[in-house]
């Protein structure tokens, strides 16, 4: 008998340790300022050195991505590529930039140009390279400067690509005013990269949040993660989304970067054709299965405005959308409804993406 008891003991100890590990799973969070915004990574995982290392590695990745994709920090890869483009010669596209550049061009076409990663000079003209003090009073650029810039040419329609047998992917532009700016997609891309890295490190439950653009993995133990959607005016949230496994939630709003002039708000999401802030919507949230698509899509739908956003959503293959018009009217799509809990006092109407006109059906 005795030897058997001894043989069992280590097994029991091992099981107790495993149980202990499971109990030791807890919510842990780290924050940092990255890509001009607050990054928060929250995990539900054992508190140990492996989790610490995974979190630290995630923040290093965010720093690296920021360093590659910054459009105007002098030594960033994208900034140098923009300078090279301004020579108007054929120049090689750096390998680091290729996958996201090609994906962004595809999404730009699919969004019918509403999402356009070639508006850097317009962003600069409006003074949105840096975030203005919230609510600061400032004058918009004079209209003739906007017209002149539009005439010179902005947007990725001015980017040509070709494959060279020796140098690989090459690019050229026909205008000195094309500056690539991935501000509307880079955060989603960074979120996707960090999520993939956390998964490789064995983390199964996490939220990676870059300034309200986020992707969720797994759950918080027995309960699902709950994602609040910020109210575009005032404090608090307008709705919460119940997580179902791996899911991305991306929001574009007119409250992120803006200034005020004569009582009017001028924000940072710009219409590629008018050259001015897009009008009609104040917040667009999309729920997708990857954050890169979600980021481009939330910007594209915002630009498309109150009449066109359903068509652009369809063209991009996005079916879970929440939109707030400047009147305060909230619309949700049928596919989002089962995941959505509206905050007390918020009313929404259902917008069927296949319907040609707005259907006035109250959301459950
Ligand atoms: P946020 O970065 O606040 O989440 P977005 O994802 O909508 O918001 O990105 C807005 C940023 O994208 C702007 O600051 C600017 O750099 C760039 N941008 C502005 N208008 C457009 C547009 N129509 N298409 C693509 N990028 C845009
Ligand atoms: Mg975006």
Image (spheres, rainbow, N blue to C red):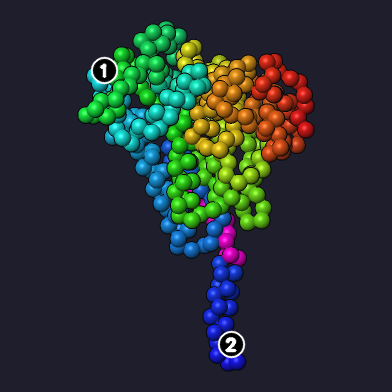
Picture coordinates of residue 81, whole percent (x, y): 29, 28
Name the residue: 58% across, 92% down.
2
Picture coordinates of residue 232, whole percent (x, y): 62, 30
- Which residue in the structure is indicated by mark 2? 5
Question: For residue 26: magenta?
Answer: yes
Name the residue: 47% across, 16% down.
272
Q: Is residue 71 in sight in this rendering? A: yes
Give the quarter of the figure containing the N terminus: bottom right
State the separation of the CA atoms marked 1 and 2.
Answer: 80 Å
Give the quarter of the figure containing the C terminus: top right
Q: Quadrant of residue 228?
A: top right
- SS category of the residue bearing label 2: helix
Name the residue: 39% across, 28% down.
102
Crowd rating for badge 2 (residues with CA inside 10 Å; few <14, some 14–19, many 20+): few
Crowd rating for badge 1 (residues with CA inside 10 Å; few <14, some 14–19, many 20+): some
Q: Depth check: 202 or 134 in front? A: 202
Picture coordinates of residue 157, whole percent (x, y): 39, 16
- Left or right of residue 78, residue 281 in this image: right
Identify the mark nearer the N-term, 1 or 2. Answer: 2
Picture coordinates of residue 254, whole percent (x, y): 56, 26
Extreme residue toward the left, this view: 166
242, above or below 91, in the image = below
* Residue bounds of the magenta highlight: 22-31
Name the residue: 55% across, 90% down.
3
Question: For residue 278: magenta?
Answer: no
Extreme residue toward the bottom, this view: 2
- Which residue in the structure is indicated by mark 1? 88
- Left or right of residue 310, residue 341 in this image: right
């Amino acid at each position: 008998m005795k030897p058997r008891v001894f043989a069992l003991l280590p097994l029991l100890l091992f099981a107790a340790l495993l149980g202990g590990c499971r109990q030791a799973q807890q919510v842990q969070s780290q924050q940092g300022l990255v890509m001009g915004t607050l990054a928060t990574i929250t995990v539900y995982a054992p508190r140990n050195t492996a989790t610490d290392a995974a979190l630290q590695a995630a923040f290093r990745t965010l720093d690296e991505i920021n360093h590659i994709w910054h459009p105007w920090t002098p030594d960033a890869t994208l900034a140098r590529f923009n300078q090279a483009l301004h020579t108007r010669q054929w120049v090689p596209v750096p390998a680091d930039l290729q996958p996201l550049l090609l994906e962004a061009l595809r999404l730009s076409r699919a969004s019918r140009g509403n999402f356009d990663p070639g508006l850097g000079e317009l962003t600069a003209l409006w003074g949105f390279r840096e975030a203005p003090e919230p609510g600061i009073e400032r004058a918009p650029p004079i209209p003739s400067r906007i017209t002149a810039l539009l005439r010179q040419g902005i947007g990725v329609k001015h980017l040509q690509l070709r494959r060279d047998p020796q140098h690989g992917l090459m690019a050229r532009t026909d205008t000195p005013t094309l500056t690539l700016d991935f501000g509307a997609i880079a955060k989603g891309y960074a979120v996707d990269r960090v999520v993939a890295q956390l998964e490789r490190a064995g983390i199964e439950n996490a939220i990676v949040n870059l300034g309200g653009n986020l992707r969720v993995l797994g759950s918080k133990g027995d309960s699902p993660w709950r994602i609040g959607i910020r109210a575009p005016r005032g404090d608090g949230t307008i709705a919460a989304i119940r997580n179902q496994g791996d899911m991305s939630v991306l929001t574009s709003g007119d409250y992120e970067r803006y200034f005020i002039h004569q009582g009017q708000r001028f924000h940072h999401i710009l219409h590629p054709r008018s050259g001015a802030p897009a009008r009609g919507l104040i917040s667009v949230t999309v729920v997708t299965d990857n954050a890169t698509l979600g980021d481009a899509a939330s910007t594209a739908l915002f630009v498309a405005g109150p009449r066109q956003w359903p068509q652009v959503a369809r063209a991009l293959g996005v079916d879970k959308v929440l939109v707030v018009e400047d009147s305060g009217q909230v619309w949700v799509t049928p596919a989002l409804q089962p995941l959505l809990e509206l905050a007390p006092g918020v009313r929404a109407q259902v917008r069927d993406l296949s319907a040609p006109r707005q259907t006035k059906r109250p959301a459950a």
